[in-house]
Structure formats: C-alpha cells, structure tokens
C-alpha cells in the first residue's frame, strides 16, 4: 500500500475517522533536507508493516491548517495516530530504529517500550 498524500481537506476522513487503524503521518516540506533524508526509511517501513499500519504524508506548505491544528512547528514531524487520536510523536531527523519503535508502540508491541 503506497504512502497516501493527505491534504487539509481530507485529513479528517483519512486519518481521524480511520478508527480501527494505526496511522503514521509524516509532516514535511519540499525544501526540508532532513524530511527528504527520512523519506526512504518511511517508505521501507510502510512496506514492512503493510496491512498493519497506514502511512500518510502531508506537505506543511501546501496544507497549513492541519499542521497548525496539531501544533507542528518543526519538521520533519512524525505523528502516530491510533483510533483517530494522537498516540505518539517524533520531531526532527530520526533513525529507522526510533521510527520503528514508535510504530511498534502503537501496535502494542512490548518490545518497543524503552527503546526509543
């Protein structure tokens, strides 16, 4: 399943109303070098967790309302939504291990505890 491009207009429907799923949303911008650096990690993890976790990205320049709503002041900013609510967040350039720990915590995997 590809990473969904989300916009202000469809965020509520695609993310907040997706109550039965865990969704990782990447808040990014085209000019952001750290955003570009973590994109391959997110793509790799989206394949690994296909069917268990949904992945989405939202360009903060083209869609200012949602980042403002969730107080996204720095990018990259990864927010994990579970049952339509913010579950956890990572801000700044981060490692594959930290992103995967975030995902595992959302899935309730105890191996994630204390490894972020």
Image (spheres, rainbow, N blue to C red):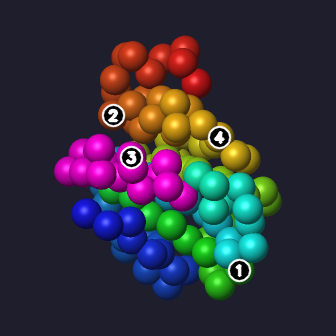
Residue at 38% of width from left, 66% of height from top? 3
Q: Is residue 78 left or right of residue 30?
A: left
> Pointer 2: what residue?
107
> Pointer 4: what residue?
94
Q: Are marks 3 and 1 in contact (CB under 8 Å)?
A: no
Secondary structure found at label 2: loop
Q: Earlier in the sequence, mark 2 or mark 1?
A: 1
Residue at 72% of width from left, 47% of height from top? 92
- Specify the label residue 45 is tagged with: 3
Between 21 and 97, the one nearer to me in the picture: 97
SS assignment for the magenta stretch, majority: helix
Q: Earlier in the sequence, mark 4 or mark 1?
A: 1
Residue at 45% of width from left, 35% of height from top? 100
Q: Are marks 3 and 2 in contact (CB under 8 Å)?
A: no
Q: Earlier in the sequence, mark 3 or mark 4?
A: 3
Residue extending farthest left: 51
**Numbered disc total:** 4
Sort mark 1 into few (<14), some (14-19) or many (20+) by Cα contacts within 10 Å.
few
Task: Look at the image and say whether residue 48 sits in the magenta stretch.
Answer: yes
Secondary structure found at label 4: loop
Q: Earlier in the sequence, mark 3 or mark 1?
A: 3
Residue 93 at x, y percent in the picture:
70, 46
Q: Is residue 102 left or right of residue 37?
A: left
């Amino acid at each position: 399943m590809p990473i969904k491009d989300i916009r202000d207009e469809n965020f509520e429907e695609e993310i907040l109303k997706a109550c039965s799923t865990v969704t990782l949303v990447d808040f990014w911008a085209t000019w952001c070098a750290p955003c570009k650096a973590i994109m391959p990690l997110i793509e790799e993890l989206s394949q690994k967790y296909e069917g268990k976790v949904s992945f989405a990205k939202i360009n903060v320049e083209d869609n200012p309302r949602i980042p403002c709503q969730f107080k996204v002041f720095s990018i990259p900013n990864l927010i994990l939504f579970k049952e339509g609510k913010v579950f956890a967040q990572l801000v700044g350039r981060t490692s594959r291990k930290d992103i995967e720990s975030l995902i595992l915590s959302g899935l309730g995997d105890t191996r994630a505890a204390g490894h972020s």
